[in-house]
Image: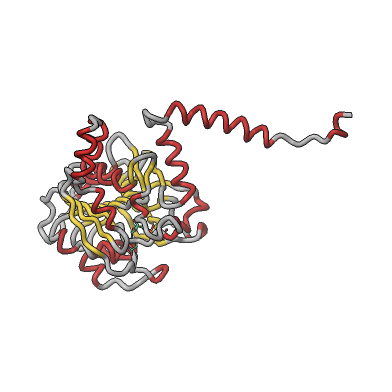
């Protein structure tokens, strides 16, 4: 297939930059997030944002901008050196822990503040100067993605072939369309790669053009910033990234890559708890104990579920 290039000469560029919006209020985790960044909530022992940074690095990203807001200082501290802690671990010979602490500091991270949480689109707009005239990745901390090839790498591979914006999507149950941005897929140009007709934000199931929902990885061309600068608030009175991508799609082609791996939604309480359990079950330190605990708990719960027989029934 012969793909058109974009008009700003960005087509030969490698994707090297990622933006992680982390300035949201995290209201679904209140009161925990009253004074703490939701991105620092750990899955077993690792803050969710560290999983995202690791996916970026595995995909060859060289520079990462984290968009932060009020109360997000711990994110900066997490990726900074902590000399006192490092000395202490060294003195006590805790080399394994020292390695874990040190590996978070070897990343090219940049930070910018979003003064008011006016929406995801507005958060991405704060990255304009950092990104310049290059294609870039947006990664949401709410979604942890697991696949043999990291999803960010999959999008970069698609970009190398198409030189076009590519949004990650995933099949969801039809009844859930109103919780997501949904694509209206056009022709499939490669297995799992759709030339998108248009995007619809949170449609009711009877209005949804498909069951393919936007998930938290976007590869975008820099023209998105021209659109975002003029983007009016949409759903929830927020400046929506989906609306801007839909507008971008009117002037250049936008593709959607269907993700076939496993997605962990850690943005709400139940998803977060399920993810913690699944990761706990593969964590070398706790997996055995957690497994036995769950089996015991299962027995207790199914005993509780037994119908209660009154003494009369036994007479
Ligand atoms: P969400 O709406 O899922 O996150 O935004 P939230 O606002 O933090 O959480 P709730 O809904 O109140 O519980 C998706 C992503 O976009 C970022 C969030 O930090 C999250 O990673 N975001 C959202 C911003 O950076 N700025 C915004 O103005 C809005």
> What is the tally of numbered marks visible in this picture?
0
Residue 103 is at least partly visible in this image: no
Query: Which residue occupies 36% across, 69% down?
Result: 238
**Residue 40, percent across and down?**
34, 50
- Side (left or right) of 251 relative to 307: left
Tell which of 119 and 176 is nearer to you.
Answer: 119
Q: Quadrant of ligand 1?
A: bottom left
Query: Which residue occupies 29% across, 54% down?
Result: 74
The colour mode here is secondary structure
Residue 52 is at least partly visible in this image: yes
Query: Which residue occupies 18% across, 63% down?
Result: 128
Q: What is the quadrant of the C terminus in the image?
A: top right
Q: Which image quadrant for residue 232?
A: bottom left
Q: Taking 28 as reference, is 97 above or below it? A: above
- Side (left or right) of 17 relative to 51: left
Query: Which residue occupies 32% across, 55% down?
Result: 196
Tell which of 148 and 75 is nearer to you.
Answer: 75
**Residue 63, percent across and down?**
16, 50
**Residue 53, percent across and down?**
25, 46
């Amino acid at each position: 297939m012969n793909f058109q290039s974009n008009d700003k000469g960005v087509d030969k560029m490698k994707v090297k930059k990622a933006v992680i919006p982390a300035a949201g209020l995290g209201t679904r985790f209140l009161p925990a997030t009253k004074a703490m960044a939701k991105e620092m909530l750990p899955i077993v022992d690792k803050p969710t944002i560290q999983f995202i940074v690791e996916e970026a690095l595995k995909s060859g990203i060289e520079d990462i901008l984290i968009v932060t807001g009020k109360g997000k200082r711990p994110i900066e501290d997490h990726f900074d050196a902590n000399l006192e802690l490092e000395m202490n671990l060294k003195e006590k010979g805790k080399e394994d822990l020292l390695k874990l602490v040190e590996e978070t500091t070897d990343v090219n991270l940049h930070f910018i503040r979003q003064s008011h949480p006016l929406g995801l689109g507005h958060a991405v707009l704060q990255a304009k100067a950092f990104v310049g005239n290059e294609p870039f990745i947006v990664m949401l901390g709410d979604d942890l993605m697991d696949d043999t090839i990291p999803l960010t790498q999959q999008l970069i591979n698609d970009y190398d072939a198409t030189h076009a914006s590519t949004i990650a999507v995933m099949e969801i149950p039809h009844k859930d369309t109103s919780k997501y941005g949904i694509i209206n897929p056009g022709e499939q140009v490669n297995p799992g790669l759709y030339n998108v007709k248009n995007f619809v934000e949170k449609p009711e199931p009877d209005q949804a053009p498909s069951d393919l929902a936007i998930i938290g990885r976007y590869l975008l061309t820099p023209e998105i910033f021209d659109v975002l600068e003029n983007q009016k608030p949409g759903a929830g009175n927020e400046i929506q990234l989906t609306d801007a991508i839909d507008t971008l799609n009117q002037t250049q082609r936008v593709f959607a890559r269907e993700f076939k791996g496993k997605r962990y939604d850690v943005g709400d309480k139940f998803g977060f708890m399920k993810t913690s359990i699944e990761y706990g079950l593969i964590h070398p330190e706790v997996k055995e104990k957690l497994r036995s605990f769950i089996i015991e708990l299962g027995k207790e719960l199914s005993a509780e579920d037994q119908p209660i027989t009154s003494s009369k029934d036994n007479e």
